Amino acid sequence: MRLLVLPGDGIGPEITAATVAVLEAASQRFGLGLELTHDIVGHASLKQYGATVRPELLTMARERDGVVLGPAATFDFKDEAKGEINPSMYLRKNLDLFANIRPARTYPGLPTRFPPFDLVVVRENTEGFYADRNMAQGNGEILVTEDVSIAMRRITRQCCARIARAAFELAERRGKHVTIVHKANVLKIGDGMFIEECRKVAAEHPGVTVDDIIVDAMMAHVVRAPDRFDVVVTTNMFGDILSDLTAEMSGSLGLGGSVNAGTDYAMAQAAHGSAPDIAGRDIANPFSLILSGALLLDWHGRRRHLPAFEQAARAIETAVEQAFGAGEVTADVGGKLGTRKTGEALAARLLAG
Ligand code: ATP
């Protein structure tokens, strides 16, 4: 498996280094033959190449089996004409990575205020309220006058149907329950279409139970009883917000792993941002990107029918579970280790089997 590794900004380089250590250990133990190519995005790329992300990276990504992308300082990147492009948007859009799979679960060794839960947010990734990916050219967010802005939300049947399929296929392998999260009481046309397409796909999966919840009510339901959810399918922005909440409920936003998947390509990317408030201090939790790496190995193993990759993914998840018991974790989840040592301890745990 050949991967392109792009560390990004803020805590990106620290959590990426820890992830690389763990992926290399997994490769060694399970004979995965991982080949990693390192390049740059974000501020480092802007400084060196005049753009936060270069078109060559797309070619490099396509020539490989996947990408590991660290978080980028997207808030700093305001003007595409100056090369300030959101790398995450650029790669998701151009590689057509329409499904953002964001699991959140509790761990026996990590106390939280919630009952044990294990759910996955399946978030549409290529349209919705994200105006920067809705147009063939230009941006769907427009400054009409100095005091008036308009943003365009695009919803298409095709994108609703394909994200629904991803959610129902996942539910078939899990607890066979899908919750559709929407705002169809206000966004009657777009979210009406989203529900309609989800219900059509549901009809092809009679063994999966389905319900739907309005997004604002979902905030209460998920906090009140997270254990009643299995797979939650939703549009782009709702999924982005909801999955940060569920990651934090699992113990820390720093546990929010995610994979962005298309029909034949996938990219590991933590659910959180570049966390400038804790960057460079060796305190960021690397488990988010490490778990994202595990999701990417699992995805690859399933697609290519390579059981060793699925085993490696399970072993990484098990090692993370055990790390909580052993206290080999960062301060956000009650430990004393730094980012680097947390990665090293996990890699050692994997190698020890
Ligand atoms: P950005 O502008 O890149 O989105 P942000 O700080 O606005 O950055 P996040 O990076 O998502 O948004 O961070 C939100 C909060 O969660 C911050 O307080 C941050 O320190 C914390 N956080 C995010 N990721 C981690 C992590 N891996 N480990 C520990 N804390 C984290």
Image (cartoon, rainbow, N blue to C red):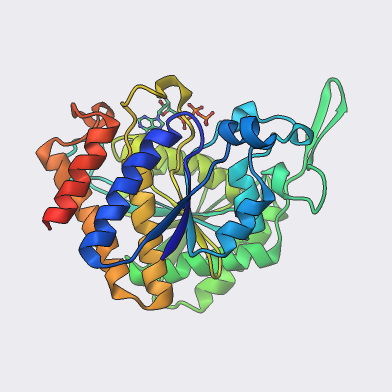
- Residue at the (23%, 47%) spot, across then down: 116
Displayed-image quarter of ligand 1: top left
Can residue 223 be seen by looking at this rendering?
no
Q: Nearer the viewer, residue 350 or 178?
A: 350
User: Splitting the image into 4 quarters, where does residue 170 fall?
Assistant: bottom left
Q: Nearer the viewer, residue 310 or 62?
A: 62
65 relative position to 284: left or right: right
Q: Answer above or below: position of 298 versus 220.
A: below
Can residue 263 be seen by looking at this rendering?
yes
Q: Answer above or below: position of 89 versus 277.
A: below
- Residue at the (72%, 43%) spot, across then down: 131
323 relative position to 104: left or right: left
- Residue at the (57%, 40%) spot, across then down: 41
Viewport quadrant of the C terminus = bottom left
**Residue 12: x and y, percent?**
44, 35
**Residue 26: x and y, percent?**
26, 58
Viewport quadrant of the N terminus = bottom left
Q: Residue furthest right?
A: 145
- Residue at the (27%, 71%) spot, across then down: 308
User: Splitting the image into 4 quarters, where does residue 142 fall?
Assistant: top right
**Residue 312: x and y, percent?**
26, 63
Q: Nearer the viewer, residue 96 or 106?
A: 96
Q: Answer above or below: position of 152 versus 211.
A: above
**Residue 201: x and y, percent?**
55, 73
